[in-house]
Image (cartoon, rainbow, N blue to C red):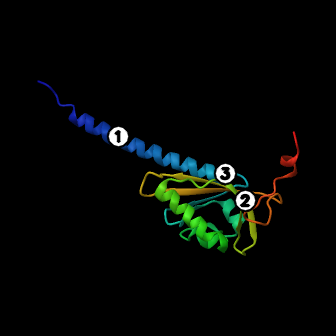
Amino acid sequence: MRLSTEPVRRLLSRFRRREVATLSRSGEVRFRELLESLPNIAVQGYDRNRQVVYWNEESARLYGYQKSEALGRRLEELIIPIDMREQVIALHEAWIREGRAIPAGRLILHDRACRPVPVYSYHVMLGDLTRDPVMFCVDVPVGSEISSSRSEWTPPASELEAP
């Protein structure tokens, strides 16, 4: 007489699914903890419609919107100057549709009071091959080394000196 191993296989399969889900949740928790612990680095997450799904404490400090005020609002309504909005929307849509990443670079965004906020901005898309990708912007504040023009950057003196 041969015993069926199917019930054991189903039980192990169910256990593995639970284990993967648990690891996935713990990984997400660790990832969020990492984003919250980055000193002086503002991180915002946006969905495919550019609506805020993540806003860390440094974003609140830098841009003047509390997390509760930013969540659900569109990126361009919060920190993108009017003259940059069309370009930002087009770049985001190209990333979603065509997989063309937004290059890192120096930008002058604005805070709640529309004061300029110079940052070096990195962009990362997670889940770009899914129906629900999330783009994270990692903004590092920069000081006076950025010019007032959005299209021109003046490098710090140390970068202008010959070796």
Between circles 3 and 2, the one closer to the viewer is: 2
Residues at marks 3 and 1, CA–CA distance in whole angstroms: 33 Å
- Left or right? Give the position of 79 relative to 163: left
Q: Position of residue 90 (x, y in %)?
A: 55, 65
Mark 3 vs 2, N-terminal side: 3
Query: The C terminus lies in which quarter of the figure?
Result: top right
Q: Position of residue 48 (x, y in %)?
A: 49, 62
Q: Is disc 1 in contact with disc 2, using a CB cutoff of under 8 Å?
A: no
Q: Is disc 3 in contact with disc 1, using a CB cutoff of under 8 Å?
A: no
Q: Which residue is the site of mark 1?
A: 15
The answer to which of 122 and 56 lies nearer the viewer is 122
Query: The N terminus lies in which quarter of the figure?
Result: top left
- Left or right? Give the position of 157 relative to 128: right
Circle on res. 63 = none
Residue 53 in view, yes or no: no
Q: Residues within 10 Å of mark 2 (few under 14, many from 20)?
A: many
Mark 1 vs 2, N-terminal side: 1
Q: Quadrant of residue 119?
A: bottom right
- Which residue lies at the image location 46% right of the left edge and 46% below the top edge? 24
Amino acid bearing label 1: Phe
Residues at marks 1 and 2, CA–CA distance in whole angstroms: 46 Å
Tag 1's secondary structure?
helix
Amino acid bearing label 3: Ser
Amino acid bearing label 2: Val
Circle on res. 119 = 2
Q: Is residue 44 above or below residue 21?
A: below
Q: Residues within 10 Å of mark 1 (few under 14, many from 20)?
A: few
Q: Which residue is the site of mark 3?
A: 37
Residue 77 in view, yes or no: yes
Mark 3 vs 1, N-terminal side: 1
Single out the residue that lies furthest toward the left.
1
Q: Position of residue 40 (x, y in %)?
A: 73, 55
